[in-house]
Structure formats: structure tokens, C-alpha cells
Image (spheres, rainbow, N blue to C red):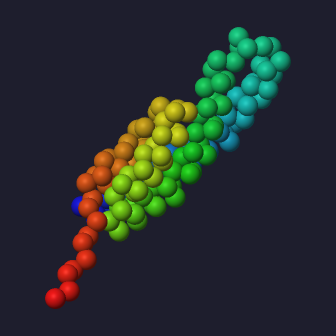
Amino acid sequence: MRTAVLIVGILGSIAAGTLGVLWYLDKNSPAGVLLEAMRNDLLRLGPDALSELQRWDRHVMAIWFLFGAVPLGFGGAILGFNGRGFCGAVLFFLAVLGPAVLDWRSLVFTSVLCIAGLVCLFVKRSRPALAN
């Protein structure tokens, strides 16, 4: 069970980091730069024109939460592997929560971390051997 937590946690962390990199590259693409320029222009027009660009702003903020999910996922994997299942599960769920609140589409990649968190809840701490 511990090995499964370690493997799934590392895979989920890599998936979250990959999505963060993909979205970061998208943000810095010509279309992303154009959207950023449009956002600056629409700020002058008022709140009615901002709905799509507010979604874009949440999307861009989710990138940084995805980058933060990488060390949280690795930490959860290590804690789960060492028998600290509940603490590891908390880290996994926190790694999923931030990006999911900002952009639900991140769940496609971070759902692996949800699975790791659920598996981590079943990890039991090893008991020390009794000395005779």
C-alpha cells in the first residue's frame, strides 16, 4: 500500500507539474499575450466586458497553484510511504484543492493526486517490534 501511495503520488505530482508547464506556455504564447493586452484594454471599459477575462485570470493564477502542487504531491508521497497516511492525504488533497477552485479543468490532471490521497488514508503506521 505504501509503495502504491509513493508511485501514484509521484505520478500525480508530475501530472500537475506538466499541466502547469503547458498552461504557462499557453499564457506566454502569442494568443495569451494578446488576451493579456485585451484584458488591459477592457479594464477601461467596465465590468460588463470582463467575464471571459476573469476566467483567464483565474486560469493564470491556477498555473502557480499547479506548480505548488508538485512539492505537495512529493511530500504527500513520502509521508504516505513512511506510514504517515493521514498527513500525506492532507497534502494530496491540498494540492488538488487550489487549482480546482480556480479552474475545474485542472482536475483532469490532478485527479491522480485525489486517488493517491484516498489510498493514503488506508496506510497504517508500522508498529515497532516488541523486544523479549
Tell me if 67 is positioned left or right of 105 in this view. right
Tell me if 51 is positioned left or right of 110 in this view. right
Q: Position of residue 28 (x, y in %)?
A: 68, 42
Q: Pick the residue in front: 42 or 104.
A: 104
| Rendered residue at 57%/51% (across/down) | 67
- Quarter of the image containing the C terminus? bottom left
Dividing the picture into quadrants, the one containing residue 107 is top left
| Rendered residue at 27%/59% (across/down) | 123
Dividing the picture into quadrants, the one containing residue 10 is bottom left
| Rendered residue at 48%/47% (across/down) | 95
| Rendered residue at 38%/52% (across/down) | 89
Q: Pick the residue in front: 115 or 80.
A: 80
Q: Where is residue 33 in the image (x, y as percent from the top left)?
A: 72, 35
The reply to whether residue 20 is visible in this rendering is no
Q: Residue furthest bottom?
A: 132
Q: Position of residue 83 (x, y in %)?
A: 32, 65
Q: Residue furthest top?
A: 48
Q: Residue furthest left?
A: 132
Q: Which residue lies furthest to the front in this view?
A: 132
- Look at the picture and state if 130 lies above or below 12: below
Tell me if 127 is positioned left or right of 113 in this view. left
- Look at the picture and state if 53 lies above or below 127: above
- Look at the picture and state if 74 lies above or below 126: above
- Quarter of the image containing the N terminus? bottom left
Number of dots carrying numbers: 0
The reply to whether residue 86 is visible in this rendering is yes
